[in-house]
Image (cartoon, rainbow, N blue to C red):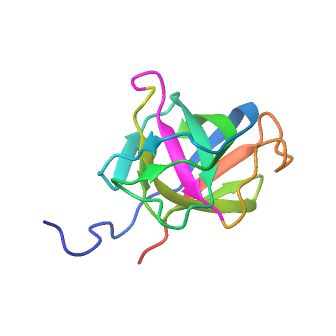
Amino acid sequence: MIKKNPYAQKKIIKGNIVTILDSIIEKRGLKLITPHSRAVKKGEIHELIATEEKEAGPGKIVNNVAYVCFFEVEEGGVIVIGDEVYIGGKFIGKIAGFDDTHMPNHQNTILYTPKKKTGVELKINLNEEISIKFIKK
């Protein structure tokens, strides 16, 4: 078992918002997979879902969620638990985990934020840039 974070450096993943979501579900039951990272390829479309559940993480179940957006990956790479998510340059939250419910169509990427908000509540726009930035622990 790996005892320390194996990621020394990685590039920023960039993309663009293709769909803005506006829904909150209190009992979603998302089963986060145990891997701490996921590779994403240029051109793929993935979903971003927010939760304020502090215990959200690999192997956990997340219920209280807000649907934020779908984004198209413009510059692929590896998303890691703890990476920071920015939309239009504004900090949105940190990656908490991944759910494979809709794979291979798209990955549900779950982020932790102290106050969950939908894409509409966040006032994000179509084609706005999303950046997922590495934070070395």
Where is residue 102 drawn, in percent x and y?
A: 45, 26
Where is residue 137 drawn, in percent x and y?
A: 41, 78
Nearest the viewer among 73 and 34 is 34
* 42 horizontally vs 49: left or right: left
Q: Quadrant of the N terminus?
A: bottom left
* 73 horizontally vs 40: left or right: right
Q: How many marks?
A: 0
Where is residue 47 drawn, in percent x and y?
A: 58, 36
Task: Name the residue located 29 percent from the left edge and 51 percent from the top edge.
Answer: 34
Residue 22: quadrant of the picture:
top right
Task: Name the residue located 30 percent from the left edge and 51 percent from the top edge.
Answer: 35
**Is 112 inside the magenta-drawn segment?**
yes
* 117 horizontally vs 65: left or right: right
**Relative to 8, residue 38 above or below:** above
Task: Name the residue located 40 percent from the left edge and 34 percent from the top edge.
Answer: 100
Nearest the viewer among 129 and 118 is 118
Where is residue 107 drawn, in percent x and y?
A: 47, 34
Magenta-colored span: 103-113
Task: Name the residue located 43 percent from the left edge and 30 percent from the top edge.
Answer: 101
Nearest the viewer among 104 and 73 is 104
